[in-house]
Image (cartoon, grey):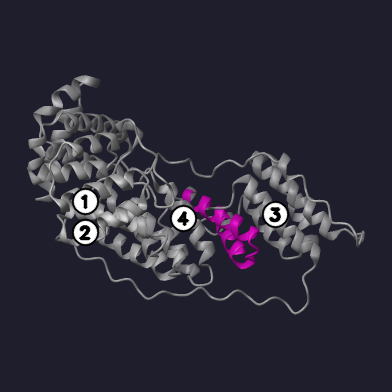
């Protein structure tokens, strides 16, 4: 049945979009029921989640058509439950909030449906408190799976700040109700970011594995990469590095290398010498284990770790041997800063007791390039940490879907929280003030260069 729906949906998408220019497509849209258009939108977004980026322009066209149909539909159209649910799903799939508000204002709804619609509108308008209140009594698992998946994602997103554990359970529900869809992609992506916050290394590795296996080709995968790098650094003491290597082995060689370089950079800045050395070696040696052509970035980040751990003298030679021409402009500036710090640390000139060491002129450093191209805006719904801005047109809000498959196995129950290992105690002897100052300087440099994952 799922296959038949997919085939018929693909045929309908082709009929709607292929060869129908611009506004002409919108003018023909009223021939279809709202729920039919929304099903097509969901199928298209599922393809996008799987890596079919060629469907992105079609998504925009289909959103325009659906918006036109919603705005011009007779209010009686939404007395049909399928069409009312389609209106709500469209709202959470990149629909225009203005259209949703306009349509809902013309409908005579029962109290439960009114709260449901208002909660979704509040979420799209960046009003999480209103969303929480309106949807408090709504149980996603009690809804039709297509709608329930979106509601679980919405409720989970507004619960992240105050109830992270509850948010994780809701993301699991979204995945249970919508396997293989953009809803699952978004829920997994949020879960990976949230796992480090609740200090659950096991869940972090498991969800990362599922994301890389199924959605690495998604246009939103760079957001996953940000969360993955930040999570590895935050959970380094409670995750198995061999398992980490198994996850990155599912990436292509260049993706794997970039991820390890980013981990090495952040770990070096944070003074995590062991993790930085591990990631630098992985990036430098590659999958075949031979370091034929040493990557200057790996050398630089490895050097950063050594400098901040107080072995600057040993690293000056290695830093000086890095091929600067193979570094980006931002990393060349970082190399200059590291060499300056290392030279300062190894200087035999005593510091004047009444004076403070002069900091590096980090304001003059150029910004570092981004390792991974920024993705299009998150199609689903905005992350809880970001206040969504109202859209004046369908194109202003990308999209998200969910094709129900209740026969799929349920998501496994989450394991118990694995707390982070306590930080290593401070050494008995006070740390050299120069080393402390160097670490602070490098942190400032990294923030300026944009290298520290948020």
Do we see residue 402 in this rendering?
yes
Q: Are marks 2 and 4 in contact (CB under 8 Å)?
A: no
Residue 286 in percent (x, y) is at 53, 55
Q: Could you tell which of marks 3 and 1 lies nearer the N-terminus? A: 1
266 to 103, vertically: above or below: below
Structural distance between the alpha carbons of marks 3 and 1: 49 Å
Residue 150 in percent (x, y) is at 25, 52
Residue 303 in percent (x, y) is at 70, 57
Structural distance between the alpha carbons of marks 4 and 1: 31 Å
Residue tagged 1: 116
Q: Secondary structure at mark 4?
A: helix
* Mark toward the viewer: 2 or 4: 2
Structural distance between the alpha carbons of marks 2 and 3: 48 Å
Q: Could you tell which of marks 2 and 4 lies nearer the N-terminus? A: 2
* Mark toward the viewer: 3 or 1: 1
Residue 304 in percent (x, y) is at 69, 57
For the record, the magenta segment spans: 255-283
Residue tagged 3: 442
**Front-most of residues 68 and 204:** 68
Q: Are marks 2 and 3 in contact (CB under 8 Å)?
A: no
Question: Is 218 placed left or right of 259 in the picture?
Answer: left
């Amino acid at each position: 049945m799922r296959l038949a729906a997919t085939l018929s949906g693909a045929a309908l998408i082709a009929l709607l979009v292929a060869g129908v220019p611009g506004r002409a497509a919108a003018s023909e849209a009223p021939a279809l029921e709202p729920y039919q258009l929304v099903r097509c939108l969901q199928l298209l977004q599922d393809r996008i989640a799987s890596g079919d980026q060629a469907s992105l322009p079609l998504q925009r066209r289909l959103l325009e058509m659906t918006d036109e149909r919603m705005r011009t539909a007779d209010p009686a159209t939404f007395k049909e439950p399928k069409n009312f649910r389609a209106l709500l799903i469209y709202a959470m799939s990149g629909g225009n909030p203005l259209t949703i508000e306009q349509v809902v204002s013309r409908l005579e709804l029962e109290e439960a449906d009114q709260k449901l619609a208002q909660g979704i509108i509040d979420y799209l308008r960046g009003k999480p408190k209103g969303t929480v209140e309106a949807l408090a009594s709504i149980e996603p698992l009690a809804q039709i799976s297509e709608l329930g998946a979106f509601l679980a994602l919405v409720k989970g997103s507004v619960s992240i700040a105050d109830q992270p554990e509850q948010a994780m359970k809701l993301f699991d529900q979204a995945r249970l109700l919508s396997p293989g869809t953009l809803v699952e992609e978004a829920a997994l992506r949020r879960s990976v970011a949230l796992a480090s916050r609740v200090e659950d290394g096991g869940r972090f590795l498991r969800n990362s594995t599922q994301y890389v296996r199924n959605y690495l080709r998604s246009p939103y995968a760079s957001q996953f990469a940000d969360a993955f790098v930040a999570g590895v650094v935050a959970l380094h003491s409670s995750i198995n590095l061999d398992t980490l290597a198994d996850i990155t082995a599912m990436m292509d060689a260049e993706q794997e290398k970039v991820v390890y370089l980013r981990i090495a950079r952040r770990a070096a800045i944070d003074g995590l010498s062991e993790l930085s050395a591990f990631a630098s070696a992985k990036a430098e040696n590659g999958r075949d284990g031979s370091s034929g052509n040493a990557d200057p970035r790996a050398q630089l980040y490895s050097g950063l770790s050594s400098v901040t751990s107080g072995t600057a003298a040993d690293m000056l030679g290695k830093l000086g041997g890095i091929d600067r021409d193979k570094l980006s402009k931002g990393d060349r500036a970082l190399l200059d800063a590291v060499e300056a710090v290392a030279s300062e640390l190894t200087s035999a000139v005593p510091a004047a007791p009444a004076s403070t060491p002069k900091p590096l002129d980090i304001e003059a450093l150029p910004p570092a390039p981004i390792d991974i191209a920024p993705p299009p805006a998150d199609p689903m719904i905005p992350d809880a940490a970001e206040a969504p801005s109202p859209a004046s047109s369908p194109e202003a809000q990308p999209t998200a879907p969910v094709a129900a498959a209740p026969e799929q196995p349920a998501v496994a129950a989450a394991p118990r929280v694995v707390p982070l290992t306590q930080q290593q105690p401070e050494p008995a002897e006070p740390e050299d003030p120069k080393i402390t100052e160097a670490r602070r300087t490098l942190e400032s440099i990294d923030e300026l260069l944009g290298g520290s994952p948020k």
